[in-house]
Structure formats: structure tokens, C-alpha cells
Amino acid sequence: MRTVTIGILGSGTVGQDVLNLIGRRQHIFDDLGVRLEVAGVLVRDPSKPRNIPSDTPVTAQPDFLQECEVVIECMGGIERPLELLRPHLRSGRAVITANKALLAERWDDLRAHALDGRLYYEASVMAGTPVIGPMSTVLRASTFTRLQAVLNGTCNYVLGQMEAGQPYAEALAQAQALGYAEDPPTLDVGGFDTAHKLTVLARFSADGNFPYQAVQVQGIEDVTLADIEAARAADERIKLVATLERQDEGWAATVAPRRLPATHALCTAGASRNAMVYEGEECGSLIFAGGGAGGMVTASAMVGDLLDYLLGFPGHVPLH
């Protein structure tokens, strides 16, 4: 058996589910001839109760990262995870992350490692619904023309509640009470979470250096019940849509509320889920839809990335 030492940054919902899913899939690692050893889980408060295996080493000190072959980052944020991951990546070791904000906003620090195949981040867009894998491999044989996507579950929920007659403020408060929205919720309803994800997708389809600052962002805060009713009267629905398409000699990336026909794939396949319509000259129109958030959904993609690493597959390489 080959021993592979891993470290986990963060033990919120996703971090706990990653650890539990690794335990459930132990037979797969056994079949690969791999013994996984968790060197540590970095947290703020080690005394806090957690739903993880009892023998998991939990600590507030990051020293254990020095002995890890792979680090799985589940903590979120930008500066702190980058500070912890930078020396690990520079030493040529692998990182698995779902951190779309870090990927979008600090690409200059990460791109060289991604090009070397050391960065795995399927879960950063649409969580456990695989879109980055296909876009970074087989779809490159097709000439990309356009994509449209619904990428934020909080906005989906709020707009859905508004369709049922709830005013925006009440729908948002309910989303927060259910734990769907961040506090404050600006990252979600302001469109910035969607813009982070669109930036990541653009680097596989348009430009490997696509900058986050190039995305034009408008959130759903100004959508009213009157807007919802006007769309319904025209047999349309309002969605927060991320769009990437060619414009003149470059690419236009936008995030904004859009009225779409009720029969549009983003309104049917993506009725209450994340969804993406990808268009290429040779491959035609492809529809991806599924769970785009949640602890175990996200963990499924992150553990899948871990399996890819153990099998010898490189991480997700952007356009050169």
C-alpha cells in the first residue's frame, strides 16, 4: 500500500463532508493500493463539536501542512488560504479547492501552478455537476461560441419565491434563515459569486488569462414583483444569467437578471438547480444541469479530484 498524506483546510459543512465521504469510499482507495493518512484539519476552534471521524487530528496550527502531499482547501476567503497554499504549491505539491473567489481574483498567483497540473478545482463551479472537466478536455476540439449559465442557488431560490408572490426582502430573509444565503448576502444576490464562477469558466473557453475585472455585474436586488409578473404574462421567467460570448475582437462577460422564455433550458433543466448551456461550432448546444451547492454535493467533486490525483491525472489546465 502507498501512503498518501493529506491535509484539510477548514471544517465547515464542506470540510466535514469531504472527510466523511473519504471514509465512505475507503474501498476505492484500497483498490488503488492507497492508504490515505489525514495529517491534520486546520480550524479556528479545535474544541467545537464536529461530525467527523473521532480519530481525525483537528488543530488551529498549520504546521502539519509541511508533511502533506495533497492539501484540500475548504475554508473559503482569499488572503488566508492563499497564504497557506502558496508555499505548498511552490514546492510542487497538489491542491484541491472549490474556492472560486480565490481562483477568480488571485489568478496571477495560481495560473502557473494550474498550467503545471497541480491545481484541481472541479467543485469551484456548479459543485458536483461536472462542467470544468469536459470544458478542459474533450470540448477543446470544438470552436467555442457562447455559454449561458445559472450559477447561484441563492438567487434561484429568491427569484422562485418571488414567483410565488413573496416580495424580494421577505424571500431573501427566508433564504438567509434556511442557510442558503451568506450574511451579508451581497456576494450572492449582488451577482459577484456568479461573476467569480463565470471568470473560471472563461479561462477554459475564451482566454486562459481572463480577468475577473472584465465581468460586468448586476445583481437581483432591483428585481420587483411587477417585473416577475410582467415576465410571467409574456410566458417568461427572470433568472440571474451569466453570459460569455464573442463581441467584436474580444469576449463579453456579463452577469445580470434576464427574461428568458419559460421553455429555455435554463428555466426547465435548471428549474431549481444550476445549469449551463454551452455552444460550440462542432459540438453544437450542450446542456449541463444539477446540484450546484451543498456540502456533500461539493464534497463529491472534491473527492473525485482527489481520485484523479491518485490515478495520475493532472489538474484542470486553462487555455494556454
Image: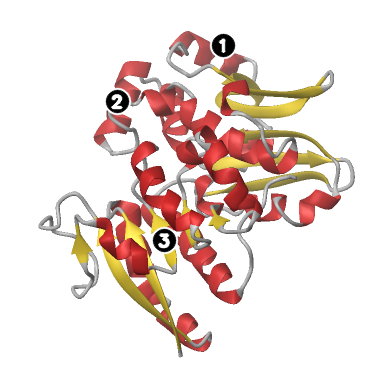
Judged from the image, the secondary structure of the residue bearing numbered disc 3 is strand
Measured in 3D between alpha carbons, the distance from the residue under mark 2 to the one under mark 1, in whole angstroms, is: 29 Å
Say how many tags the image has: 3
Q: Where is residue 220 in the image (x, y as percent from the top left)?
A: 47, 18
> Is 33 drawn above or below residue 255 in the view shown?
below
Q: Looking at the rendered structure, which numbered label has been put on residue 71? A: 3
Are discs 2 and 1 less than 8 Å apart at CB? Answer: no
8 or 224, which is in the foreground?
8
Looking at this view, is 259 or 14 the one in front?
Answer: 14
Task: Please name which of the two marks, 3 or 2, marks the residue nearer to the observer.
Answer: 3
Which residue extends farthest right?
A: 282
C-alpha distance separating marks 3 and 2: 29 Å
Q: Is residue 167 visible?
A: no
Any mark on residue 230, and which? 1
User: What amino acid is found at the position of numbered circle 3 in the picture?
Assistant: Val
First reached walking from the N terminus: tag 3 or tag 1: 3
In the image, taking residue 81 as reference, residue 32 lies left or right, namely: right
Residue sitting at 29 percent across and 65 percent down? Answer: 64
Q: In this view, does 273 lie above or below 175?
A: below
Name which residue lies at 64% across and 56% down.
116
Q: Nearer the viewer, mark 2 or mark 1?
A: 2
Please say if 1 is above or below 139: below
Residues packed near mark 3 inside 10 Å, few (<14), some (14 to 19) or many (20 plus): many
Q: Residue 273, how many percent across, how many down?
A: 52, 42
The quadrant where residue 313 appears: bottom right
Crowding at dot 2, Cα within 10 Å, few <14 / some 14-19 / many 20+, comes out as few
| Marks 2 and 1, the one that precedes in the sequence | 2
CA gap between label 3 and label 1 equals 49 Å
| Mark sitting on residue 126 | none
Residue tagged 2: 184
In the rendered view of the protein, which quadrant contains the C terminus? top right
